[in-house]
Amino acid sequence: MTILNDWQAMYAGDSMGMLEALWNLPDQCARAWELGLATPLPPGRDVRQVVVTGLGGSAIGGDLLRVYGSGRLSVPVVVNRDYVLPQFVGPQTLVFAVSYSGNTEETLSAYREARERGARLVVLTTGGRLKEMALADGVPVITVPAGIAPRAATGYLFIPTLAVLSRMGMLSGVEAGVEELSRHLQSLREKYKPEVPLDENPAKQMAANFHNRIPVIWGASGTTEVVAQRWKGQVNENAKAPAYWNVFPELNHNELVGFQYPPELLQRLYIVILRDPRDHPRVVLRYAVTREIMEKAVAGVTEVTATGRDGLARLYSLIYLGDYASIYLAFLYGVDPGPVKVIDRLKASLAGK
Ligand code: F6R
């Protein structure tokens, strides 16, 4: 029997409760909205730019905000994954400093820089040095529950930013979107949960497609790009395996050419195209032509389309599938999805320098 049909074994091999955290994501999203409503707002109006500064699982919420907000916000959202901030950051910039642990050195450095530049700040964290500094500086802190992996906390690390921007009058209609999101995820988890066997479970089938192959995830600019990035990161961190991502239409102008050599290795690649009902009609045409070219070159190509009415539900419908698939892939490789010992070792080694 495949491990994917042995749900007790999967729960037993999941030391950090990644499956449980995924199951709880609908609730997490609803609670995250409440956290964002309860936080004090940073002083001042007239915000010209929004910057989300963080790394890894704490930064992806910034990309979700950037994509979700691009048609709704009148100001740009920039995601900063670095020690330093872009030159434009100043008193008219709203900076969300996000670190689940509160101890990521790049984020602490960017936080300090934002303070020096007089930016308006909101901190999202479970604690650590970041919370200490924010409390001492009188910066609003959204304290999110500890005890899960940062990448399992995207609801907590992203949705409060929507609540803050809503309350500042910069976004509207988000509350209904968050409600739909929770409901939609509740119905999707019934399809993806470990108790549903492989032949009825699209997340397990996706993991089986990826097994012993290298996933290549393609999204589209402005819709599913952030999901492609998320799937890649989740395969890396959960399954401890490589994966790559890119976006349409850009990949049609370079990456597409690179699928001729070496043919034996290309037969180890598996391509997923992540689609959204609102993709540009010319991009939709590109999917079909690209797929035709790729099918001969790689092990397989599959397409998945986002479901849900509002953009939030649609983004998360795909994220949820990728999150489950990456955890199932971990079990296929016989690894525990939770621990990321390599990142921990790297952080510990840098902390001593
Ligand atoms: C671990 C994970 C990592 C961390 C990153 C930054 O689950 O997803 O990508 O998010 O190393 O750490 P934090 O989130 O604590 O600032």
Image: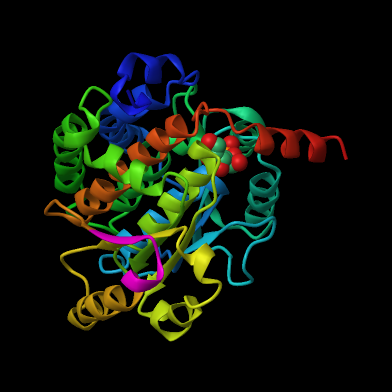
Total labels: the figure holds 0
Residue at 58% over, 72% down? 88
Is residue 143 among the parts visible in the rendering? no
Does 147 sit left or right of 224 as displayed? right
Residue at 50% over, 28% down? 334
Question: In x, y percent, where is residue 312?
Answer: 24, 51
Question: In x, y percent, where is residue 160?
Answer: 36, 41
Q: Nearer the viewer, residue 278 or 337?
A: 337
Residue positioned most to the right = 353
Question: In x, y percent, where is residue 116?
Answer: 69, 56
**Magenta highlight on residue 149:** no
Residue at 46% over, 66% down? 49
Q: Nearer the viewer, residue 225 or 1?
A: 1
Indicate the quadrant of ligand 1 in the picture. Answer: top right
Q: Quadrant of residue 289?
A: bottom left
Question: In x, y percent, where is residue 44?
Answer: 44, 56
Q: Is residue 30 above or below residue 167?
A: above
Q: Quadrant of residue 346?
A: top right
Q: Is residue 76 above or below residue 244?
A: below
Q: Is residue 310 above or below residue 287?
A: above
